[in-house]
Amino acid sequence: MTIPIERPIRRRPAKEAKVCEEHGTALMWADCGNCFEGFTGHDCGEDCCCCLYPEDNVTCDICNGQGGFFLCPFCSPNADF
């Protein structure tokens, strides 16, 4: 019997007008390169996963499950917006 695991709800921050304190420019959203929509993989707690339809449930430790970051285009010129 497979016990269903509740997937945490990813709450993307509101994309309201956020401003860089140093440059005064609007911050832009950049997706996290470590995860997909805030999750990095599946962990059901078993050594050998027997889930029929494993869903990602491990929250990304880089973006804290947000799926990305608000960045200043001048402070982070190499970011992929």
Image: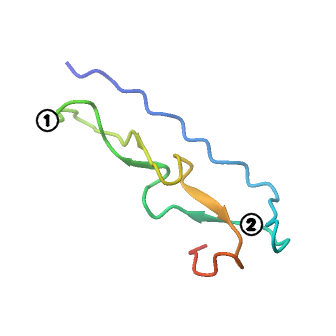
Residue type at the position of mark 1: Cys
The x and y percentages for residue 68 are 57, 58
Residue type at the position of mark 2: Leu
At label 1, counting other C-alpha atoms closer than 10 Å, the crowd grade (few under 14, some 14-19, many 20 or more) is few
The x and y percentages for residue 57 are 39, 39
Residue sitting at the far front: 22
Task: Determine the residue positioned at 68% across, 48% down.
Answer: 13
Quarter holding residue 24: bottom right
Cα gap from disc 2 to disc 1, whole angstroms: 43 Å
From the viewer's perspective, is 64 left or right of 76? left
From the viewer's perspective, is 72 left or right of 23? left
Quarter holding residue 77: bottom right
Q: Secondary structure at mark 2?
A: loop
The x and y percentages for residue 32 are 51, 61
Task: Determine the residue positioned at 58% across, 75% down.
Answer: 79
At label 2, counting other C-alpha atoms closer than 10 Å, the crowd grade (few under 14, some 14-19, many 20 or more) is many
Q: Is residue 77 above or below residue 34?
A: below
- Residue 72's disc is none
Tell me the residue that label 1 is attached to: 48
Tell me the residue that label 2 is attached to: 27
